[in-house]
């Protein structure tokens, strides 16, 4: 076999020749590797699909990772596909804590678990019961309910299928263990009102630990369910509004309307989403021109009210019912004050 400079290969002698090209690069080349790979895939897929129409190179096959690749058990193709890898990296804090895994806390975890936080610490001393399943993310099976697991272990099992770093603490946070939160980069409070909550907030404020407290306050009458949900933010150097304006109630029975067992899944999910939006704005994932520290959503008017923004140009004086909400993010009947649910 001989080859000429023209690219002709003499395979069997003068009676049979082949003209070959060792590159299918178009004139001007490729814009990037994506265009190069998809160009070659397109050349292959056509003939293959004439034989079997169902074949495709676009399998999106998941790629398993190890600990050196990050917190997820498989590659995060979403961030690269959406072009937000740089912004997503801003969420890679070392330690984030969620106190309480009732309705709001569970939805907080659902969103946080899909961010590159190294360690997600969960605190809740209660069990996952049947009523919890109806305002929780996902779908609990009979086996899950019959297992009698603590909430932290139920959710640890669920989200460990996707990521590393879920740390379950099957206890409530009280004055005796609140110091475990002091090395946190951020804390979410989704717990019942009570003296333990005041202790936690006082300690976090005193030590400059940023946190978001959430609350759902609703009532029902013949016309339907009405009320508000809120998030209150505390950041280093911006804490005076919490004590000065009594935005958070710490005592059961302060306001009977907000000291109820009425919780609805979509309100818990909304509260969690508002908290995560504010958290991600704090970390510069989202643009933040308001920098507010307190947000209330009113069910009946479908309006959001922000306070303590910079500049403060919105609703300092028009927030409906500017009274402290008990902050119960997941109240269960029969729980003692301060129980996280």
Image (spheres, rainbow, N blue to C red):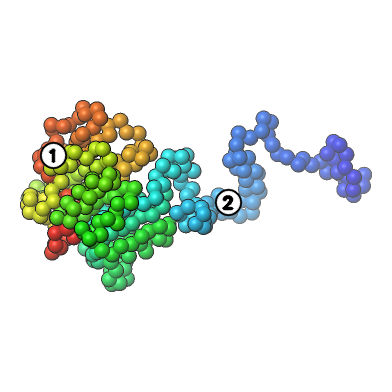
User: In the rendered view, does 300 fall on the left or right side of 137?
Assistant: left
The disc placed on residue 60 is none
Q: Position of residue 172 (x, y in %)?
A: 23, 61
Category of crowding for the residue at label 2, using alpha-carbon neighbours closer than 10 angstroms: few (below 14), some (14–19), many (at least 20) = some
Q: Position of residue 203 (x, y in %)?
A: 22, 50
Above-or-below relation of 103 to 297: below
User: In the rendered view, does 300 fall on the left or right side of 121?
Assistant: left
Number of numbered tags placed on the structure image? 2
Residue 52 visible in this rendered orientation of the protein: yes
- Is label 1 in contact with label 2 (beta carbons under 8 Å)? no
Above-or-below relation of 191 to 236: below
Task: Depth check: give the residue in front, 97 or 22.
Answer: 97
To which residue does mark 2 refer? 56
Residue at 47% over, 49% down? 76
User: In the rendered view, does 27 fall on the left or right side of 219?
Assistant: right
To which residue does mark 1 refer? 245
Category of crowding for the residue at label 1, using alpha-carbon neighbours closer than 10 angstroms: few (below 14), some (14–19), many (at least 20) = few
Residue at 24% over, 37% down? 238
Residue 132 visible in this rendered orientation of the protein: no
Q: Position of residue 336 (x, y in %)?
A: 14, 62
- Mark 2 secondary-structure assignment: loop
- Farthest residue to the right: give it: 14
Residue at 11% over, 50% down? 258
Q: Which of the 4 image quarters holds residue 180?
A: bottom left
- Mark 1 secondary-structure assignment: loop
């Amino acid at each position: 076999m001989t080859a000429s400079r023209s690219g002709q290969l003499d395979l069997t002698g003068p009676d049979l020749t082949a003209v070959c090209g060792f590159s299918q690069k178009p004139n001007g080349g490729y814009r990037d590797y994506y265009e190069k790979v998809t160009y070659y895939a397109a050349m292959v897929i056509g003939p293959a699909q004439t034989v079997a129409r169902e074949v495709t190179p676009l399998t999106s096959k998941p790629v398993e990772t190890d600990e050196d690749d990050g917190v997820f058990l498989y590659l995060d193709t979403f961030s690269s596909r959406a072009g937000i890898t740089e912004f997503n990296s801003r969420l890679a804090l070392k330690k984030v804590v969620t106190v309480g895994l009732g309705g709001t806390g569970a939805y907080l975890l659902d969103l946080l678990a899909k961010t590159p936080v190294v360690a997600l610490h969960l605190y809740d001393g209660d069990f996952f019961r049947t009523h919890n399943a109806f305002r929780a993310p996902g779908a609990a099976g009979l086996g899950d309910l019959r297992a009698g697991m603590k909430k932290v272990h139920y959710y640890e099992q669920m989200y460990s299928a996707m990521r590393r770093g879920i740390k379950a603490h099957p206890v409530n946070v009280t004055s005796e263990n609140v110091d475990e939160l002091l090395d946190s980069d951020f804390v979410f409070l989704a717990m019942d009102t009570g003296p333990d909550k005041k202790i936690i907030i006082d300690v976090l404020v005193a030590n400059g630990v940023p946190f978001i407290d959430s609350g759902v306050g609703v009532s029902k009458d013949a016309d339907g369910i009405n009320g508000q949900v809120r998030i209150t933010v505390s950041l280093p150097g911006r804490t005076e509004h919490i004590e000065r304006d009594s935005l958070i109630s710490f005592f059961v029975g302060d306001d009977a309307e907000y000291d109820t067992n009425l919780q609805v899944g979509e309100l818990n999910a909304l509260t969690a989403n508002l908290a995560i939006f504010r958290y991600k704005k704090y970390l510069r994932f989202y643009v933040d021109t308001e920098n507010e520290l307190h947000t209330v959503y009113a069910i009946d008017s479908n309006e959001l009210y922000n306070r303590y923004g910079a500049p403060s140009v919105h609703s300092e004086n028009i927030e409906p019912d500017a009274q402290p909400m008990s902050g119960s993010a997941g109240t269960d009947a029969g729980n003692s004050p301060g129980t996280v649910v």
